[in-house]
Image (spheres, coloured by chain):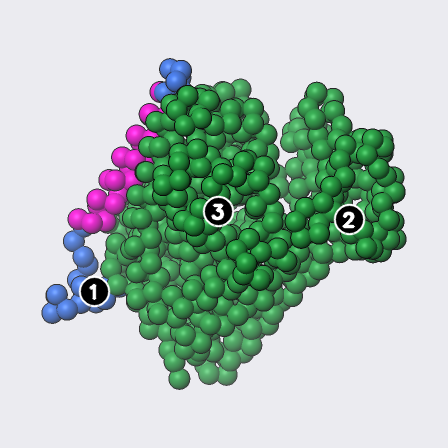
Chain colours: A blue, B green
Amino acid sequence: MNTSALIMMISVESIVALLTIWFFYKVLTTKPKPEPDSFTKNDEKKR
Amino acid sequence: MASNTEAWGSRVGLVLAMAGNAVGFGNFLRFPVQAVQNGGGAFIIPYLVSFLLMGIPLLFIEWSSGRFGGKYRHHSTPFILQSMDRRWIWKYVGVFGIFSNIAIAAYYCYIESWTMSYMIHSIIGTFDGLNQTQVAAFFSDYLDVKTSTTGIPYEALVFFVFCIALNAWILSKGLSSGVEKVAMIGMPLLIIFGIFLAIKGITLKAGVHGAINDGTVGLNFLWTPDFTSLANPKVWLAAAGQIFFTLSVGMGSIQCYASYLKKRDDVALNAMSAGWMNEFVEVVLGSAIIIPIGIGYLGIDKIIELTNLGGLGLGFRTMPFLFEQWGPALSAIAGVAFFGLLFFAGITSSLAMGTPGMGFMMDEYKWSRPKSAWAFGLVVMILGLPTIFFFNEGVFDEYDYWAGTISLVIFALLEAILFSWVFGMKKGWKEITDGADIQVPLVYRFIIKYITPVALILVFTGALLRPVNDDWSSINLKGWKLHNESIIGQLQHKGAGPNRQWFSRSFYAEADGIVDSVYSTKGNNYFFRTSAIQKSGKLSSKVYRYNPSKHQLLVEKGDVVFTGQAVYAGPVINRVFYLDMARLLLLTVFLLISLLVYIAWNKRIRERRIRR
């Protein structure tokens, strides 16, 4: 691959991949809101 | 009496369902084609700018208006928009948010059914030993509903009906037990299949398994920036268009999913997570599959030629042949992975298309979820039949143009104006940031109010007045020639050439050229082809279909024909007839949904359920 294509590909794909991972990590690790929230699967655990 | 008390099971499930809604065929088939046709690596710059200035704002607008409408127990856009401003017009603007989903599902489920069929054909080895022309011919045979590739009569129709039944059955199970479960299984599988194929694509070696180029040649071709293209409005409009279709904004399905969120739950982080996940699938995986593999086996020139036929042509006419080069076992695995990832991309989107209409019937007419789901399936099946039976007459493309392209732009433009200028940015910003688990940059308040509506107006105007050959320098006050695919050009049937009447006694040549072949294919389909060398030096061909039992061919091999010259005589139903009927059908669906909204509105008045 030529240098400009390589720089373009690596920089764009890295930014996109890192932001995707970061936002999804935040979704996984953010504490749920107090009940009643919108999600049913965590209802029993909290009671 | 049923009531709409659906809920999401988990936050991850919601994000994956929203990402699945966005990730569709376009991520793998449309994006690489658009990138190749618009400057390779430089396309990504306007693409990402459009994502930041139009995509993310529209995601914020749709997620927050959905949650806002959900507070009043509205789960479809007619009354979600009405809850933001009480003027009567908004509920009819909201009709787009049901109409687009139903009309798109009608042809989208058809593509989805192709992926199911192609998975089976990959497993049973149908493509073993076929050359590229035979694989391409297989696709044409498959689309001809009378021809069977498996022995099942009306095979394409059978797969289509099965696919719709599967969608309706999953939808009937509910949000958390149906849609969310499919997203939780489908999205990870899609990413695994995508990574497998991307690795195979970029590690192709010239000389191994018949490859003529390394996989990196394709990547080089796709990612080498051509910065001169940045000054071309065509590239910017293509990039903005791609952002639109890839995120599923302007459809009404995001609002529907978000309407099941409670007031204090986050929308900002969820929107960003689902949006960026779609970008990952598109930019990282979508760019590493069909172009590197295609160029690896067929070379750059052939792939450029094939991209002119669109992503569907590349995906279904070409990829099975390329996978065959890897040997029977690996080609079966690759076929299942490729068509499997397309299937999961498709079904997570088509399920989202079912929910707005169902939400509306459950809210307003108290239908149960199963009844709404099966009714959605029935309507989609009826509306989809013309796309199957008249695929070659252009009905499929007509649905895609009006319902899958223009309706989205119109709806997104109107909802952006409603949100930022009518509902007001003060309230709008509060809706976006209430309960937010991330700090939303303040600059988005400005972008949503000013930049996004202007960008959408430009996209719409660009589509309306697109010049011929996308030559924007030809625009001047004296007027310019319109592109066949501009909105005005489409309305005038500019692409129809001399065959502009619904019915006629002769069919006229649509291009100059020499008749270079007269032939027939399986299923008694008869064709002749004319070819001519264009000014650019490229060979252009035009294929005409005729029926020898009804038509008398007036030309033979070697004849020179000119545009407008009669090439066969006999009763002809021209393409414009089918296109006008398709438009009429879509308009009827829109009006029927508007009527249902009108009746529901009056019902609300009678029952005193209107927010004063």
B123 or B177, which is in the foreground? B123
User: What chain letter is assigned to the residue under label 2?
Assistant: B
Can you tell which of label 1 and label 3 is closer to the viewer? 3
Q: Is residue B329 above or below residue B107?
A: above
Q: Secondary structure at mark 2?
A: strand
Q: In terms of secondary structure, where does tag 3 sit?
A: loop
Name the mark on residue B126.
3
- Which residue is more in the foreground, B95 or B502? B502
Closer to the camera: disc 2 or disc 3?
A: 3
The answer as to whether the residues below labels 2 and 3 share one chain is yes
Which amino acid, mark 2?
Tyr
Q: Position of residue B157 (x, y in %)?
A: 56, 61
Image quadrant in which the C terminus of chain B is located: bottom left
**Mark 3 belongs to chain:** B
Which residue bears the numbered disc 1? A41
Task: Determine which quarter of the picture holds residue B518.
Answer: top right
In the image, the segment drawn in magenta is A7-29
Instruction: Tell me if mark 3 has few (under 14), some (14-19) or many (20+) residues whose alpha carbon lies within 10 angstroms of its own.
Output: some
Are dots 1 and 3 on a single chain? no
Q: Chain of mark 1?
A: A
Residue B201 appears left or right of A41: right
Mark 2 lies on residue: B546
**Residue A18 is at least partly visible in this image:** yes
Relative to B143, does residue B89 appear above or below in the rendering? Answer: below
